[in-house]
Amino acid sequence: MNAMASRAIPSNKRPPGRPRSERARSRILRSAAALLVTHGPRRMSIEAVAERAGVSKATIYRWWESKGELALDALVGELVAKMKEVPDTGSVEGDLRGYIRTVVRTYGNPMVGKTQAAIIGEMQSDAALRRAYKARVTEPLRTESRKIFARAIARGEVSRDIDIDLVLDLLIGAVFIRLLFDLGPLNQRVADSLVDVVLNGIHSAPGHRS
Amino acid sequence: MNAMASRAIPSNKRPPGRPRSERARSRILRSAAALLVTHGPRRMSIEAVAERAGVSKATIYRWWESKGELALDALVGELVAKMKEVPDTGSVEGDLRGYIRTVVRTYGNPMVGKTQAAIIGEMQSDAALRRAYKARVTEPLRTESRKIFARAIARGEVSRDIDIDLVLDLLIGAVFIRLLFDLGPLNQRVADSLVDVVLNGIHSAPGHRS
Amino acid sequence: MNAMASRAIPSNKRPPGRPRSERARSRILRSAAALLVTHGPRRMSIEAVAERAGVSKATIYRWWESKGELALDALVGELVAKMKEVPDTGSVEGDLRGYIRTVVRTYGNPMVGKTQAAIIGEMQSDAALRRAYKARVTEPLRTESRKIFARAIARGEVSRDIDIDLVLDLLIGAVFIRLLFDLGPLNQRVADSLVDVVLNGIHSAPGHRS
Amino acid sequence: MNAMASRAIPSNKRPPGRPRSERARSRILRSAAALLVTHGPRRMSIEAVAERAGVSKATIYRWWESKGELALDALVGELVAKMKEVPDTGSVEGDLRGYIRTVVRTYGNPMVGKTQAAIIGEMQSDAALRRAYKARVTEPLRTESRKIFARAIARGEVSRDIDIDLVLDLLIGAVFIRLLFDLGPLNQRVADSLVDVVLNGIHSAPGHRS
DNA sequence: CGCTAACCGAGACGGTACGTCTTGTCTTGGC
DNA sequence: GCCAAGACAAGACGTACCGTCTCGGTTAGCG
């Protein structure tokens, strides 16, 4: 799908032919990123990226299958890196607060939020992009954040019966629905409230435990 | 936003000129709906809708501002009606289970889910559509579902301090994140688990460390 | 094939829809003609014609099937008109001299010759263009020039057994081969010599008539 | 113009460096010829020739300056050889009939005629190709065919004042105009008629008015 | 035997133009 | 005043080739 994938082949031999131009690659990504934040992915045209990067359209089409995957490559790198380091504070509550605060802070940045929302929008009509997003964003983040619950279960803080992914769907879903539907602010208070509900529930008294 | 709204305001008098063709209107909506489910909203073109409906493009542009709003008109009507009737079982748990089960059942239908996801994707790059969606789908549903919590608070089942919208963001967000990111099944078991976590939290009961 | 053809239908009724823009048509032809003489038909691009004419490419493609046919429409009109009026001097020799001199003078003009040669070159790889050229240039001219021989036969100047088209192939062919192969000048002396050979042959003495 | 020519000049010594691959050369010419007859020179791409020949594009560009010259090399060799041997029958009429019959038979072969017409078309927008064609086809053939008239003048069959090239333009031009404009058949009867007109003219014999 | 030179394949590169597609607007005559 | 038909300007799409280039590797004669 992208350059990195083709690098993954564990071969020492250089392939024949003129090697790919690293300069072209980075100029394309930089141009794409710039156009994404100014125009959104829908109105970012390959045509414009090519012109801005001083690159031919064919070079872009050689390496990226769709506009969406180019957008992904252009924007997603450091985003994932930032959120991937989940804290280890010694308690679920601390870990989750730290993690969700980071998520909320990242997507709460209007520029990041807008473009991410646009890419998520784009992938609703582009199966390849959806797969790419899952592989490069969702899964890496989930893998890390699941560890919070693994530790919590080991510590006996939460029941070993919980469906970890479902709990993460609740927390992350709440963040994304606010982002995608423009439903409310994304700030630290909201992050903490989300974590609180998920940890303690909304039932008013212990006596109501079912 | 659409024709009916603009007509609804002024007066009882028929406006001058040829009245709007109801036949054209319904043929357009029917064609749009058909093309939406077969091609998705991205590849549904005004051109194709016009041809299928035997209608000129100008007629479509006269009554709908964008492709997205046409899609909304074509698909969203009965959807909202279905989910709007929230049950009143006498307990939060019963009410929420009933409501979330309905939501999950509706969006779990692949055809509905796909097209709704596509419209939500579309509205990420169409502010007018986002507003229209909010006004015609999100808000009406929220207005109804908030009543569940109002009753629960009145009954003392849940704390009066809870942020109702935030709790709904958790529940509905979990459903949508699964839909939009293709993350997991949408079935009754999932619906019940979501409700359980939100009501009771995931903390082990005090003193229940295993 | 072109606009005029579609006009030929002897119907009084205007077809439905927006009528074709005469302004666009003439701007396209003018731009095409200008680019033809400056760049030749091979390097005249539809892209450039559209830009120069302030017209969208689609409008050109709507009305002309190929670059060659556009070139034909752009250049051929007055060319044919000029050569179509064959003189009637009272003798084959006079008529032919007059006609061939006109042909030679027309194609001897470097700009006309170059572009005509280029169109003829183009039509070697474009069957539709070849047909169009035949219908709009070759046949109309042949129809007129055959009359010279009809009159000559009536006057008894030439045998009634001659193959008129073959004689015209000789005369016109000699002009075109010089043009297309860059073989020699095209001037009045050459025109007269061609006519002389065709009328009298090259055999040196009457006694050699076979 | 081509590789052989540049080798022919200097000396007996082999130049330094790896010698040119004869295998590559012949594979290129064979591939070019095949693509020429199937697609015509216009749609024969260097890209396709290279792939078919299993050769890199650079190798082609190293040895041929343009598509046209490659086409010339690929097709023209034996063509010239065939027509170059003009007969010597003892009379102009015999010689010319023999020669023009050969020319007509050669170009009358549809495959040869089509591809030659295409190359001639191509050279209308390629000055280098036009020069190459003249040097490798037209001039060699003219040199031979002029001898027919030299002998005829020596025998007193034709006037010593005739312009030999102009007479050849008439005969060869008639053949080519039929080929290029798709104007009529090319067969022995036509060949003989052409020769007859050029030798005897079309004037009725003096006193033979019918 | 190693050096140097010119060849070779593969294939990426910046470009140009292609012909198609869709968008939203405009311009007719008819209802 | 609505409607169908359909032409229009605009401009992005993805493709095909162009001719150039940059590699690693090959094949010779010469020192």
Image (cartoon, coloured by chain):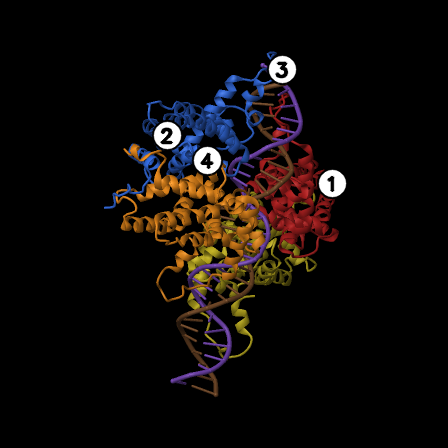
Chain colours: A orange, B blue, C red, D yellow, E purple, F brown
Q: Earlier in the sequence, mark 4 or mark 3?
A: 3
Picture residue at 70% right of the left edge, 48% below the top: C112
Q: Quickly name the residue at label 1.
A: C91
- Estimate the spatial distance between the alpha carbons at disc 3 and disc 1, rounded to whole Å: 74 Å
Circles 3 and 2 on the same chain? yes
Marks 4 and 1 close (CB-CB < 8 Å):
no
Q: As shown in the figure, which amino acid type bears the numbered disc 4?
A: Ile
- Spatial CA distance of label 4 from label 2 is 16 Å
Q: Secondary structure at mark 3?
A: loop
Quadrant in which residue F20 is drawn: bottom right
Closest to the observer, B171 or F22: B171
Disc 4 and disc 2 on one polypeptide chain: yes
Q: Which residue is mark 4?
A: B120
The answer to whether any part of residue D204 appears in the image is: no
Q: Residue at x 48, y 43 (%)?
A: A187
Q: Which residue occupies the foreground of this view, C38 or A130?
A: A130
Mark 1 is surrounded, within 10 Å at the Cα level, by few (under 14), some (14 to 19) or many (20 or more) other residues, namely some
Q: Would you name the residue on which mark 2 appears?
A: B103
Mark 3 or mark 2: which is in front?
2
Furthest residue toward top: B13
Q: Crowding near pointer 2: few (<14 within 10 Å), some, many (20+)?
A: many
Label 3, residues with CA under 10 Å away: few <14, some 14-19, many ≥20: few
Element assignment for label 1: loop
Q: Position of residue B69 (x, y in %)?
A: 51, 29
Question: Which percent across, then down, holds residue D118?
Answer: 54, 51
